[in-house]
Amino acid sequence: MVQGAVDYARAHPADSVLLVGVETDVRACLKREGAEHYRNLEVVHAPEVIGMSEKIAALKERPNDSMNMSSRLVHEGKADAMVLCGNTGCSVAAAQLHLRRIPGVKRAGILVPLPNPKGRTWLCDGGANAVCRPEHLVQFGEMASAFLENVYGTKKPRVGVLSIGEEDEKGVELTQETLELIRKTDLNVVGNVEGHHIYTGELDVVVCDGFVGNVVLKTSEGVVEGITRILKEEIHKRLFAKLGGALMGSAFKGLKRRVDWRHIGGCPLMGVDGVCVIGHGRSDRTAVFHALLQASRFADARVVERLRAHFKAQAVAAG
């Protein structure tokens, strides 16, 4: 975390980075990186720690851990965004506990970018809610579309409902009712989509419940790692393959960069009343750097403010 923050602070001197954690440990890391005197790095002491395997109850047991304290900093306006790369369940819970949800938002969802030949397909929810209702998935589509429009300039993002077939009648009650509801919005709805559509570039946003979304995310990560390992093994088996691999080195590097989750860094937590990016528990300095970059873009685009206005207008229209 500290290494990635140092890299970001060095590359973006106009931004200030608050390092929230056990002060002695953080300062020791800064010293090793030769960054103890960076003016845009500040240490905020958080004396308590929540482990990766702990339950959400730990947030109340240890109110002065880094997740709770980071969330309070954002809530109090002392920080514009936060990046959390620890226990995902506790990260999501801490954000909702202190920031609350945007008025009108029924559930917060993790927005996950997955690679396709044309860029990224963004999936929501990636694991914040194992059980959802159709109206939750509709809001995931609205929030993800607003994020893409304002952060990446995507015009009328194409939205699909993840199901087991493209026909309207396919899927379960949740997907069928979601499709019916989402078509009543002004979103650019493609219809039902299957898993393989996520990776073709035919849509920008796919909505599903967090249980399915997390399975898609973890499976995608595993497929990338598996194919990379198989490719390396096959190249080293044969002389001509080694020669071909050497000639295609730049292409392989490009492929790796496009499918490497570390170059996205983190996933926006949509629906909370503040900017929160959820990083991977395995994040290294590269991932943390890009997670901070993602958080900065999220904050600069004022997506939260736009979503507040959107859901307020919906409430007024509903009477």
Image: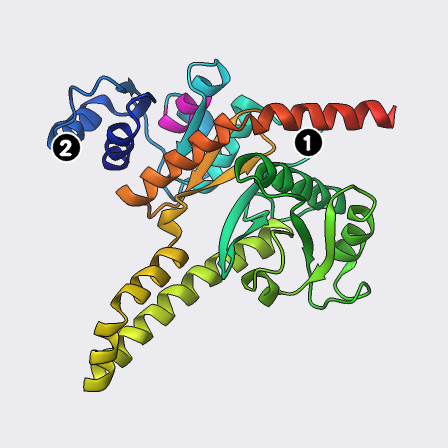
Label 2 element class: loop
The prevailing secondary structure element of the residues shown in magenta is: helix
Find residue 19 and report its horizontal and vertical position in percent. 30, 25
Q: Which mark is residue 33?
A: 2
Find residue 307 and report its horizontal and vertical position in percent. 65, 28
Q: Is residue 27 above or below residue 111?
A: above
Pick the residue in front: 273 or 119.
119
Q: Amino acid at mark 2?
A: Glu
Q: Residue at horizontal 59%, vertical 43%? A: 154
Q: Is residue 192 magenta?
A: no
**Where is mark 1, residue-wise?**
105
The answer to which image quadrant residue 212 occupies is bottom right
Q: CA distance from mark 2 to mark 1?
A: 42 Å
Q: Is residue 73 above or below residue 146?
A: above
Q: Residue at horizontal 81%, vertical 49%? A: 183
Q: Amino acid at mark 1?
A: Val
Q: Residue at horizontal 37%, vertical 69%? A: 226
Residue segment shown in magenta: 65-71
Q: Which mark is residue 282?
A: none
Whether residue 59 sits left or right of residue 18 in the image: it is right
Q: Residue at horizontal 46%, vertical 35%? A: 277
